[in-house]
């Protein structure tokens, strides 16, 4: 079925547009010094004809401003791709894409980002387009939910800064081929370092959970005098530089201290041993678990705990059967953050326990011995392993129950 009059312009206008475009490209073909052959001009003629039809559809919808934007985008493609880069085939593809997606706002902005990244931001096109494209999808969804322009602007700015901060990591992840990463992964020192990182970080996370979850529950539920001071002490491992943490552990537990000599005599020393790795990782990861668990327990409705106590359950049974299951998602989020922080610890380990080597310490040694080229694939593997474990923990979090939202009144109310 042929298109109706609602889709096509009148035949005199169509004939005039085709004739004008044909004469233009014929002139470009005959003009000396253009460098455009007959086949190239025919290809450009077909693409420009399609673009003209797309522009006519935009203007016909009664949106003169949109038509001007359509023309401005086309001229920008013409200047960037055809005149500056001299990439005729790429210009044809992008021009056709522009005419096809312009009337859909999301696709139009994604195409603009694509052109900016792959034409202007080379050679960092992929690592720039990926976060910016995902950010554009997020902003579009936020606008569709009815967010006001100020909040949309805040989200856009925040996501742009986040994309800029993530750019080094994204660029790192695409530097080495899968074959290089596979060859690096089978090295004995890399396997040992990754295994040490995962095992020590897992033990450190369990250690901080044993002491951190009860403290978080007590702070969330009790009217503790001096709670602000306790929270400041919980945050101290975040505030203290890593090198200072290492020095502090050595002063207390190093071979030159009385306690350290006693531990060495008993075979329980921490300097240069696996126990020292776990201790340093537990110290720096403790606040992340406690703060997340506190927020989770504060979100559990106090009315549910009161109901449990009314039915005869004691404080311990209420904690295990009501409070902890409902706060499990937040606690597991804190555990994931604590694990990630433990795996990434470097400064304190370099002073307290450089052996056995963890992943960050091995990256540092490889950098000192062979520069960026030797340390890069190990760093990529460490990032991939940590991301995979973090994804698994987040997936497990989604399988756990959460506090019911309908009990918002009274949530987080403290009791003496």
Image (tube, rainbow, N blue to C red):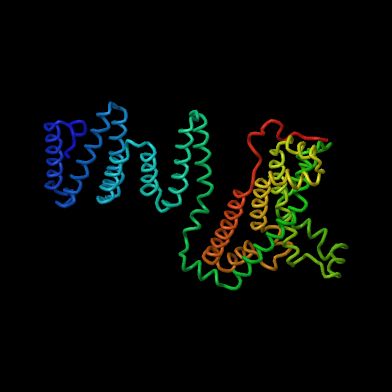
Q: In the image, is 6 to the left or to the right of 311? A: left
- Most extreme residue toward the front is 311
**Front-lying residue, 208 or 252:** 208
Name the residue: 31% across, 30% down. Answer: 66
Residue 90 lies, in percent from the top left, at 28, 50
Q: How many marks?
A: 0
Name the residue: 25% across, 47% down. Answer: 92
Name the residue: 71% across, 51% down. Answer: 241
Residue 98 lies, in percent from the top left, at 30, 41
Among the 4 quarters of the image, the one containing residue 205: bottom right
Quarter occupied by the C terminus = top right
Quarter occupied by the N terminus = top left
Residue 287 lies, in percent from the top left, at 72, 48
Name the residue: 74% across, 53% down. Answer: 208
**Front-lying residue, 85 or 277:** 277
Residue 305 lies, in percent from the top left, at 75, 39
């Amino acid at each position: 079925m042929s298109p109706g009059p609602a889709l096509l312009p009148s035949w005199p206008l169509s004939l005039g547009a085709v004739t004008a475009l044909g004469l233009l490209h014929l002139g470009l073909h005959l003009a000396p010094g253009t460098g455009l052959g007959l086949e190239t001009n025919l290809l450009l003629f077909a693409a420009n004809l399609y673009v003209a039809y797309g522009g006519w559809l935009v203007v016909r919808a009664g949106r003169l401003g949109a038509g001007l934007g359509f023309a401005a985008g086309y001229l920008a493609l013409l200047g960037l791709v055809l005149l500056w880069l001299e990439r005729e085939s790429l210009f044809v593809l992008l021009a056709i894409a522009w005419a096809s997606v312009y009337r859909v706002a999301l696709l139009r902005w994604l195409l603009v980002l694509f052109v900016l990244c792959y034409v202007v931001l080379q050679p960092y096109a992929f690592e720039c387009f990926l976060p910016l494209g995902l950010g554009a999808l997020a902003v579009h969804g936020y606008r569709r939910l009815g967010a006001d322009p100020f909040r949309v602007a805040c989200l856009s700015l925040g996501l742009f800064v986040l994309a800029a901060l993530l750019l080094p990591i994204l660029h790192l992840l695409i530097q080495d081929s899968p074959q290089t990463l596979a060859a690096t992964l089978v090295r004995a020192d890399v396997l040992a370092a990754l295994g040490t990182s995962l095992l020590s970080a897992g033990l450190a996370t369990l250690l901080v959970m044993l002491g951190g979850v009860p403290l978080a529950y007590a702070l969330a539920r009790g009217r503790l005098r001096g709670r602000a001071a306790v929270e400041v002490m919980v945050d101290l491992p975040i505030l203290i530089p890593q090198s200072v943490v290492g020095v502090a552990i050595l002063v207390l537990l190093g071979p030159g201290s009385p306690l350290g000599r006693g531990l060495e005599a008993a075979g329980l020393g921490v300097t240069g041993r696996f126990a020292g790795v776990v201790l340093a990782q537990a110290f720096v990861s403790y606040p992340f678990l406690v703060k997340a668990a506190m927020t989770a327990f504060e979100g559990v409705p106090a009315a549910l705990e009161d109901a449990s106590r009314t039915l005869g359950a004691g404080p311990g049974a209420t904690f295990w059967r009501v409070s902890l299951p409902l706060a499990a998602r937040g606690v597991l989020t804190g555990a994931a953050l604590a694990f990630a922080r433990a795996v990434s610890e470097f400064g304190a380990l370099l002073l307290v326990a450089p052996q056995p080597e963890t992943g960050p310490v091995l990256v540092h040694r490889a950098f000192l011995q062979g520069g960026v080229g030797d340390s890069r694939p190990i760093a990529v593997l460490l990032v991939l392993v940590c991301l995979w474990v973090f994804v698994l923990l987040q997936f497990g979090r989604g399988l756990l129950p959460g506090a019911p939202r309908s009990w918002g009144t009274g949530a987080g109310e403290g009791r003496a």
